[in-house]
Every structure is written in structure tokens, then in C-alpha cells.
Image: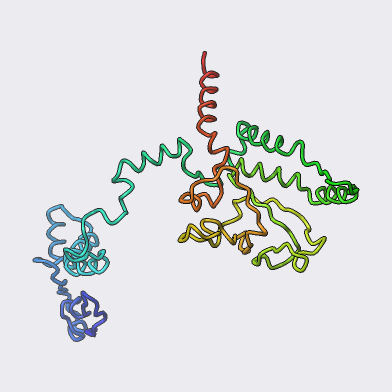
Amino acid sequence: MSRVLSSGPAGFSLSRLMGGRTKAALAAGQSDRREPYLGSVPQAERFRSQQGRGQGAPFPQDMAQALRAAGGQAGAERSALFRPYQPPAGVRGGATQAHDSAFSSSAMQPDWLTRAQADGTAFPGYPVLAELAQRAEYRHMVEVIATESTREWIAFHARGGTDKHARIAELEAEFTRLEVRQALRSMAEYDGYYGMGLLYADTGQSINETPLLLRPETFRKGMLRALRAVEPVWTMADSYSTTNPLSADFYAPTHWWVQGQRVHSTRLLRFVSRQVPDLLKPAYNFGGVSLSQMARPYVENWVRTRQSVSALR
């Protein structure tokens, strides 16, 4: 019974808990039981004195308080193990760290950002532009331009005295098969909604990273299967030059990523009617300013005025 049962930070032995009694004392049937001294007065004596004065508190609760008081130092040592690390003085600076609070510490940045969004001089992002395409005010102006630009369409004429009616009919039939008119109308709509439209030339080839060379050896008759309109939200520029303004690919992507597929720029034709400066092209995904973005302040003013008029009584 006197063997040590635990050896933690506040290790104790059963003999210490039993007040140092041995097997012989227990066998003798001694009734003078001694409690461990956890304070200045044994717990049993404190309990009896409180019961005699009518101030009796439950013994287990009193014992728990005494145990906590006795293990206060050990508990503090154990809690120190889980305390957050405090670096020495001089290792870390003040409360402001690098740019952690740069946005909140400067009053000009939120004001600049607010004015840029209100004036339409910051790219709002494709999700916002897609949401604007749901409103009638934006759709009407975009659809009118897209419809009128492809309404009269193209008329083929021949020069010289040679009869070329068969050749003209063949070209018209090919334009109808490829739905060129509808594809260019989609390009005008994407340009109005997103600031850019991309037209993919489907040749049936699985490898699109190589340039599309319009030569008899590489592009045979009947090889063009379709012209597919692609929204810019599914694309991202892959490679372009930013060092030499004299190069042909200076801020002009030579390859695009289309949902994980690398496509050469000659196979993905870009339609942009409102270009932005070179410094802003990466932020605009190498597109331009959309008509929705330019008209947004005026549409919002119109909507606010319309709501104010309807609220008059």
C-alpha cells in the first residue's frame, strides 16, 4: 500500500495520502485516522470544527478547494506549457506589421477604390459583369449594337469580266454553314458585356498549341469545322512579353488557357473594340472596357431616379 502510484508533476504516494500509515497499522484496526496536511489544519479537523459551529460545508467541495489551492503552483506550471509564444524584446516591432494594416491605416486607398468603382475606372470582374447582363438597361444597348452591326451583313461581288457566280455561291454557302453571322454577333455581345469576345477556329485537331498556318500543307480545304464563340470568363492569357515594346508579342498573348487547354492565339481570335492601356491589360485579362462598365454610373443614376419618382406621394 505504500508503493508509489503516480509520479506526475505533483506526484504522490499512497502512503503519503494515507498519512504515512503502514500495513501493520491498518491490520491493528487503529481508528485514529489522520488526513493529509494540505493546509495549516488537517481537512477532517476543519470539517469537524465547521460542523460544530453550524457552518458545515460539503466535505468534497472543501476538499476540492484545498486540492486546488495546494496544486496552484503545479497548475500554473502546467498552464505555462500552453501559453502562446512571446518573442524576446526587439525581435518583433510594434503593432503594425508590414502591410497587415496598410489598407486601414491610409484614408486615401478606400476613397480611391470607392471613386474608381463609382466612376467605372476599375475592372469589376466577370461575375459582376455577368450579373449586369441580366438588367434590361444593359442588355438593350448591347443587343442594339450587336444586331445593327450584323443586320445588313456581307454581299460578295466579283471583279472583271469572268463569270464567278459559282465561286460566290460557294462562299455564301460556306458562310451559312459556319454561321459566321451569328458568331460575329456573339462577339459583339461579348464585347459589350465583358469587353472582349474570343472566336475559336475548330479544325478538328487535338493539339491546339501550335500556330494555325493558312497553307495548303497545313490547312486543307474543308478542314474548318466550326467557329465557336467563347466567353472570356473561361480563358486566361498564358504567355506574353513585358520587356521589349518593339516585339510583336509585347502585351499581346501568344497562347491562352481555356479551361486547362493551351491554345495558340491564331486559333483563338480576340475581338476588342475598346482597348485599355498596356499597364491595365493584365488586369482586364487582355480585354477592353465593356459597354456595361462604361454605362454603369449612368444606369445606376437612372435607376435611383426612377425609384425616387415612384416613391413620391
x, y percent for residue 60 = 24, 62
Residue 212 in which image quadrant? bottom right
| Frontmost residue, 211 versus 50 | 211
Q: Is 17 placed left or right of 40 in the picture?
A: right
Residue at image point 54% right, 26% down: 302
Q: Is 15 placed left or right of 140 in the picture?
A: left
Residue at image point 59% right, 51% down: 233
Q: How is the protein colored in the picture?
A: rainbow
Q: Is 33 placed left or right of 191 in the picture?
A: left
| Frontmost residue, 299 versus 23 | 299
Of all residues shown, which one is farthest toward the top? 313
x, y percent for residue 88 = 18, 66
Q: Is residue 222 above or below residue 313?
A: below
Residue at image point 76% right, 48% down: 180
| Frontmost residue, 5 versus 172 | 172
Residue 306 in which image quadrant? top right
| Frontmost residue, 38 versus 159 | 159
Q: What is the quadrant of the N terminus in the image?
A: bottom left
Total numbered labels: 0
Q: Is 149 placed left or right of 30 in the picture?
A: right
x, y percent for residue 288 = 55, 45
x, y percent for residue 162 = 89, 49
Of all residues shown, which one is farthest toward the front? 161
